[in-house]
Amino acid sequence: MMNAFQAFLDKMNKTMVGFFAGLMLPMFMFVLYYAFKFSYLTWDQYIAGARELSVLPSFIKVCVFINLPFFFFFNLFKKFNFCLGIFISSMLYVVAMLVIKFIL
């Protein structure tokens, strides 16, 4: 059983896999945040409200936190290529948050 788990982790230990996981997990979290906290709004109202109230950077911060457990889990098993991908995608989200907050 442990060999299969280790083989799975070895297969996942690619920077691009970590990068795409790091991009997709916050998007998934954004949808879950909507489903649990703002389900009384339509999707369009949710997005428009986030833009109008300037809370989109805060939403991005909350959603990127889901990358942390995956980063630490793969770091624990020394799968550093996956961690690098997660880190790079998280930094892209941070840059997007800063652009939205201070430039737009």
Image: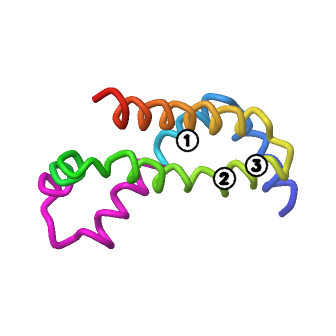
Q: Seen in the image, is 2 located left or right of residue 27?
A: right
Mark 2 lies on residue: 70
The magenta span reads: 26-46
Residue at 59%, 50% (x, y): give it.
Answer: 67
Which secondary structure type mostly characterizes the magenta part of the structure?
A: helix
In contact (CB < 8 Å): disc 2 and disc 3: yes
Secondary structure category for the residue under label 1 = helix
Mark 3 lies on residue: 74
In contact (CB < 8 Å): disc 1 and disc 2: yes
Q: Position of residue 4 (x, y in %)?
A: 80, 54
**Who is closer to the viewer here, 36 or 101?**
101
The colour style of the image is rainbow
Residue 32 part of the magenta segment: yes
Mark 1 lies on residue: 22
Q: Looking at numbered disc 1 in the image, what kind of residue is underneath it?
A: Gly
**Who is closer to the viewer here, 60 or 16?**
60
Q: Looking at numbered disc 3 in the image, what kind of residue is underneath it?
A: Phe
Secondary structure category for the residue under label 3 = helix
Q: Seen in the image, is 67 located left or right of residue 46?
A: right
Q: Distance between the residues labelled 1 and 2?
A: 9 Å
Q: Looking at numbered disc 2 in the image, what kind of residue is underneath it?
A: Phe
Q: Quadrant of the N terminus?
A: bottom right
Residue at 24%, 68% (x, y): give it.
Answer: 38
